[in-house]
Amino acid sequence: MAVIHNTTLKPTKTELLTGWLPTRPWYRGGPDPVLEKSGGFRLDDPEGEVGIEFIVATDTTGPGRTAYLVPLTYRGAPLEGAERGLIGTLEHGVLGTRWVYDGCHDPVLVTELLALIEGRAQAMAQSVSDTPDHEVSRSYSGAPLAPDGSTPVPADDADGTRLPAPHGAALHVHRVLTPVADTPPLPAQGALGHVATGWPGPDGSPLRAVLMTLRPA
């Protein structure tokens, strides 16, 4: 299980994302977002080497408060072949320098995300060690998912990020989150699987959305 350290980060995660988000084709805001970390969850790396986190980062500059999904991985050394996915580095008060990646470029995150969708991995609380996050829901109907561990090649466009998945399927990462009324949020018609969760709105009421959708070829 991943250990959550209560320590300093320089820069903070939201500071690191403030310069990166406006460079993405799916970003909807202005050049200077004001971000707050609204929610999310973690996954455990079975090898205990890579930090895996899914952050809901909300841009508070407009009345609509746009929420973005940012999958991140934290590594103690650069990931060879994933230079395009590097967001930056931060100094962790316990672990030292951490290389921070857009997790869609990291094979460890993609492998564990598919395991979550299939039901072989457990979503974990974002800020508490060794604690499952039962707010995260998932579904899958299909053949066993067995990723090959190769470095993923994500495709970003205005609608989000798409990743190739086993059996010719495509994993769609919804970068701009659209809250829905369903509890829990349900996958789109025809989807093979999905992941969904909630986070507190500005008035404390829960917002919920589908984060990832696995679609057939």
Image (spheres, rainbow, N blue to C red):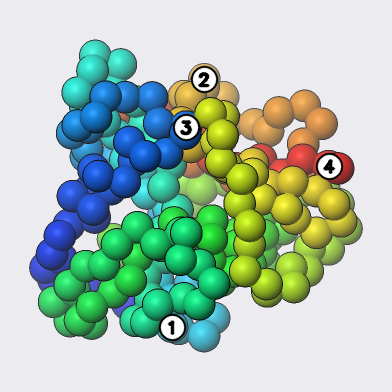
Q: Residue at x 46, y 76 (%)?
A: 79
Report, in whole angstroms, how far the alpha carbon at label 2 lies from the one at label 1. Answer: 37 Å
Up/down of 177 relative to 88, above or below: above
Which badge, 3 or 4, is on the more N-terminal residue? 3
Q: Is residue 203 visible?
A: no
Which residue is label 1 attached to? Answer: 49
Q: Report the residue marked by disc 4.
A: 216
Q: Earlier in the sequence, mark 3 or mark 1?
A: 3
Q: Can the viewer see residue 63?
A: yes
- Mark 4 or mark 2: name the one nearer the start of the chain: 2
Query: Which residue shows up at 26% across the image and 24% down it?
Result: 30
* Placement of the N terminus among the 4 image quadrants: bottom left
Seen in the picture, residue 39 relative to 191 is either above or below; the reply is below
177 relative to 172 in the view: left or right = left
Q: What is the quadrant of the C terminus in the image? A: top right
Q: Position of residue 62 (x, y in %)?
A: 23, 18
